Image: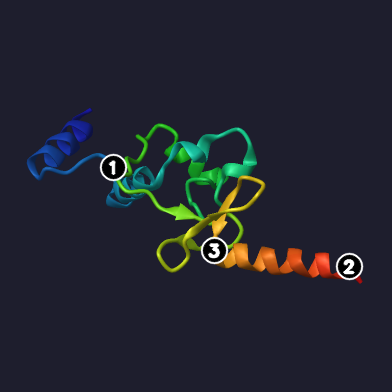
Amino acid sequence: MLIQQFRYDNYRLHQLGNNSVFTITLQAGLSAIKTPQCYKEDGSSKNPDCPVCSKSLNKLAQPLPMAHCANSRLVCKISGDVMNENNPPMMLPNGYVYGYNVSVGVYDLFKAKIAVVRI
């Protein structure tokens, strides 16, 4: 009891918390990148490059608040490239939106299949 009281008073005196700096830094980082997509039931919406989407860190980040993103970015689902002025978003006839670079590749592939059918 006396040891616990000493530690508590020492932490308060030096303005330290009970958690380690590593724990606080990890929680801040996970909270900054945590989105609702990380907790959807279907596995297709989870990003393999997102640390919060991994099973081990997903459980650690569950009680933390979600990130608030004021500026969003469009990312191509096929290539993983950011869609911007160099790779503008293009909608294919099926209604899905992909980056221009992928759309051109899909069009060339589609055109090659049509050419094979005509021969």
Report, in whole angstroms, how far the alpha carbon at label 2 lies from the one at label 3: 27 Å
Indicate whether 75 appears above or below 9.
below
Q: Residue at x 65, y 49 (%)?
A: 93
- Give the residue at the far left of this rendering: 13
Residue 118 numbered tag: 2
Label located before the other in sequence (3 or 1): 1
| Comparing labels 3 and 1, the label whose residue is closer to the camera | 3
> Which residue is disc 1 drawn over?
19
> Dot 1 lies on which element?
loop
Q: Position of residue 76 (x, y in %)?
A: 54, 57
> Which residue is disc 3 drawn over?
100
Closest to the observer: 22 or 93? 93
Quadrant, the N terminus: top left
| 4 horizontally vs 45: left or right | left
Label located before the other in sequence (1 or 2): 1
**Which quarter of the figure has residue 115?**
bottom right
Q: Identity of the amino acid at label 2?
A: Arg
| Callout 3–callout 1 Cβ contact below 8 Å | no
